[in-house]
């Protein structure tokens, strides 16, 4: 059983006492959470509905906060701190949501759920529980190409958004801490992410996230983002609060866990003092991402998901990339029917397109194309996205892809076979209607259906490398 939160009830004499800007907290942890929360409510720009300031008073009117409560150390400390703040400001209403992702053994899920409910009962905080059917997250991860962690996050934020709208909440709060930021920056660095990835979970007061199928943004605040895990544990000890341990956090098969348990301790040992500079890097990249997004909006505005090719290619390369990523984000977020999320495309794939190395690029459920003087972004069919493929061949070799084998740079072959000539790099993609389309830097090189070329470029200068396609079976690999 969890012990009661030891919080003294205050005698409130008048409204002036209720509206103190800087109340006295016995715990610095609570003061830090209060600071983040009050800053959020005093900032006009963070209200989608245009609500106004209230003379600098953070809680002069009722505010409803929805806390994401897993039962772990971070979310337990956050919820307890918010309950302590509510003791001083009764205008602050607090509710919690626990999400059972269905990816752990049932007995562990029950322990987490019971602990979250017990904590909320002791704190007098209303709580709801969302249960995701077992297997749903793993199937989602498989279909969308994301990891289990990313798939779970998708369902969690969807549930939080739906619950926030049901309650009429002003903000969702999550228990990300400074250690999470460091891990995220390292993960983004090792993946070769751009400014937005490196600046994720920044120390900014809030971020707008998509939390429901409607695709409408909802404010998500991270009030613990400047606090360390050591500070979280110290607060829990001071408040005599128990919490649950997730045994999957020790499984180093997960990328984040390997960063947390292997790379971070190594950096702590070999490079003392590395944490603050890396956090500053994340802040700088977050500011860079905002600047690039704003510049891309001004210089490369999309009109019905297309833009003049002359205008597009006259902009700096980094703005072209940013404009495409923004368009892809909005195009995917705008689909209320899709039950899967789109994995972020590889930056080098987008970069090849913006450098003019190809006239088209398939990115799963979306496609980039430069044709007839226009650059367009469009969704592909559900069937093409599920059964299709796209690959860029940059050197000679033998490649196996789905049910075909491609011999790139092979010897001269019988012209009656599935042979065509092109240059490197060559983009191969399925069109969704049974055809394989081949494009190089000079445009469309060939179309092949059921092993037979239905069209191939006749221009003798259109490509000097022989490509042969053989239909068989196997998954894609570079056999060169």
Image (tube, helix red, strand yellow):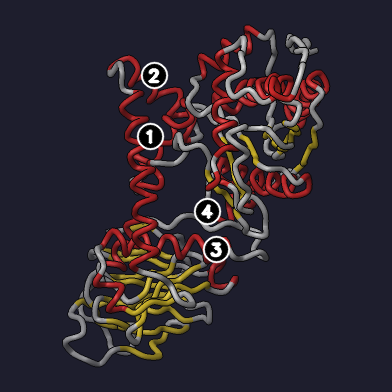
- Numbered disc in front, either 3 or 4: 3
Gap between marks 3 and 2, in whole Å? Answer: 37 Å
- In this figure, which residue is indicated by the disc labeled 1? 186
Give the tally of numbered discs: 4
- Asked if the residue at tag 1 contacts the one at tag 2, i.e. Cβ–Cβ closer than 8 Å, the answer is no
Please give left or right for residue 247 compared with residue 282 in the image: right
Q: Does label 3 or label 1 sit earlier along the sequence?
A: 1
Compared with residue 346, is residue 173 higher up or lower down, i.e. above or below? above
Gap between marks 2 and 1, in whole Å? Answer: 13 Å
The mark found on residue 332 in the picture is 3
In the image shown, does 62 or 257 lie closer to the viewer? 62
Q: Does label 3 or label 4 sit earlier along the sequence?
A: 4
Please give left or right for residue 363 compared with residue 52 in the image: left
Gap between marks 1 and 4, in whole Å? Answer: 21 Å
Gap between marks 3 and 4, in whole Å? Answer: 15 Å
The mark found on residue 145 in the picture is 4
Categorize mark 2 by other alpha carbons within 10 Å: few (<14), some (14-19), many (20+): few
- Residue 195 on image: x %, y %: 35, 47
- Residue 261 on image: x %, y %: 45, 23
The mark found on residue 421 in the picture is none
Q: Does label 1 or label 4 sit earlier along the sequence?
A: 4
The mark found on residue 265 in the picture is 2
């Amino acid at each position: 059983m969890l012990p009661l939160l030891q919080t003294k009830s205050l005698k409130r004499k008048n409204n002036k006492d209720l509206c103190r800007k800087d109340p006295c907290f016995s715990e610095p942890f609570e003061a830090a959470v209060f600071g983040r929360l009050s800053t959020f409510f005093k900032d006009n720009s963070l209200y989608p509905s245009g609500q106004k300031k209230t003379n600098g008073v953070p809680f002069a009117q009722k505010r409803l906060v929805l806390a994401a409560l897993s039962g772990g150390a971070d979310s337990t400390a956050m919820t307890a701190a918010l309950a302590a703040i509510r003791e001083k400001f009764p205008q602050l209403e607090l509710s919690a949501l626990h999400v059972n992702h269905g990816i752990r053994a049932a007995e562990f899920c029950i322990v987490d759920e019971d602990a979250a409910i017990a904590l909320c009962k002791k704190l007098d905080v209303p709580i709801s529980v969302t249960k995701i059917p077992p297997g749903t997250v793993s199937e989602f991860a498989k279909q969308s190409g994301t990891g289990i962690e990313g798939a779970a996050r998708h369902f969690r934020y969807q549930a939080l958004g739906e619950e926030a709208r049901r309650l009429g909440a002003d903000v969702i709060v999550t228990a990300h801490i400074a250690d999470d930021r460091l891990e995220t920056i390292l993960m983004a660095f090792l993946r070769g992410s751009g400014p937005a990835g490196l600046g994720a979970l920044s120390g900014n007061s809030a971020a707008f996230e998509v939390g429901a199928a409607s695709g409408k943004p909802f404010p998500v605040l991270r009030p613990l983002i400047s606090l360390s895990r050591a500070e979280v544990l110290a607060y829990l000890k001071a408040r005599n609060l128990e919490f649950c341990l997730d045994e999957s956090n020790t499984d180093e098969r997960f990328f984040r866990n390997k960063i947390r348990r292997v790379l971070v301790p190594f950096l702590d040992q070999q490079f003392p003092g590395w944490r603050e500079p890396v956090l500053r890097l994340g802040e700088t990249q977050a500011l860079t991402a905002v600047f690039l997004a704003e510049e891309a909006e001004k210089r490369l505005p999309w009109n019905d998901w297309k833009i003049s090719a002359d205008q597009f290619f006259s902009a700096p390369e980094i703005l072209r990339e940013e404009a495409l990523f923004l368009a892809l984000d909005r195009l995917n977020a705008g689909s209320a029917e899709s039950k899967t999320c789109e994995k972020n495309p590889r930056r080098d794939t987008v970069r090849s397109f913006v450098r003019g190395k190809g006239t088209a690029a398939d990115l799963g459920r979306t496609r980039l194309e430069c044709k007839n003087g226009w650059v367009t972004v469009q969704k592909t069919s559900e069937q093409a996205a599920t059964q299709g493929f796209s690959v860029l061949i940059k050197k000679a070799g033998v490649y196996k892809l789905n049910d075909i084998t491609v011999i790139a740079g092979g010897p001269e072959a019988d012209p009656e076979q599935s042979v065509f000539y092109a240059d490197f790099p060559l983009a191969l993609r399925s069109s969704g209607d049974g055809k394989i389309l081949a494009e190089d830097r000079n445009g469309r090189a060939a179309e092949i259906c059921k092993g037979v070329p239905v069209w191939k470029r006749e221009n003798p200068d259109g490509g000097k490398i022989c490509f042969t396609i053989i239909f068989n079976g196997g998954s894609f690999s570079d056999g060169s």
